[in-house]
Image (cartoon, rainbow, N blue to C red):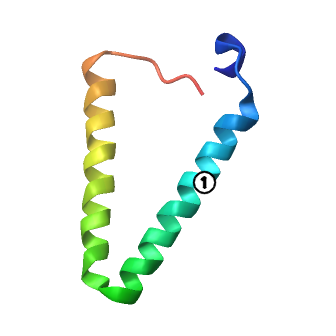
Amino acid sequence: MHRYTKSKQWISLLGVGICLVALGMLIWFALQTDPQTVWVLVFMIGVAIGIEVIYYLSNNRQLDL
């Protein structure tokens, strides 16, 4: 997609990397302070994935990787 939008690919990869590090730190902190809160994070991620799947299926889109 970066060719189509004429953007720098490394910026997107850097953003993904930073988000994954932040998620890992959040999970680590939650496990250290109150392990039961990790289930809230799992639920939030599940809801986000569910919304994406519903949007994908409702628009009859093809997945191009």
Up-down: is 38 above or below 61? below
Up-down: is 22 above or below 9? below
Up-down: is 63 above or below 11? above
Residue visible at 25% across and 31% down? Answer: 54
Q: Secondary structure at mark 1?
A: helix
Q: Nearer the viewer, residue 21 or 51?
A: 21
Which amino acid type is marked by label 1? Ile
Residue designated by label 1: 18
Residue visible at 68% across and 21% down? Answer: 2
In the rendered image, residue 24, in percent from the top left (x then y), is placed at 51, 68
In the rendered image, residue 59, in percent from the top left (x then y), is placed at 30, 16
- On the picture, is 14 further left or further right than 31? right
- On the picture, is 62 further left or further right than 21? left
Name the quarter where the N terminus is drawn: top right
**Total of numbered circles in the picture?**
1
Name the quarter where the C terminus is drawn: top right
In the rendered image, residue 18, in percent from the top left (x then y), is placed at 60, 54
Q: Nearer the viewer, residue 63 or 42?
A: 42
Query: Within 10 angstroms of label 1, few (less than 14), some, or many (20 or more) residues?
Result: few
Residue 45 image-quadrant placement: bottom left
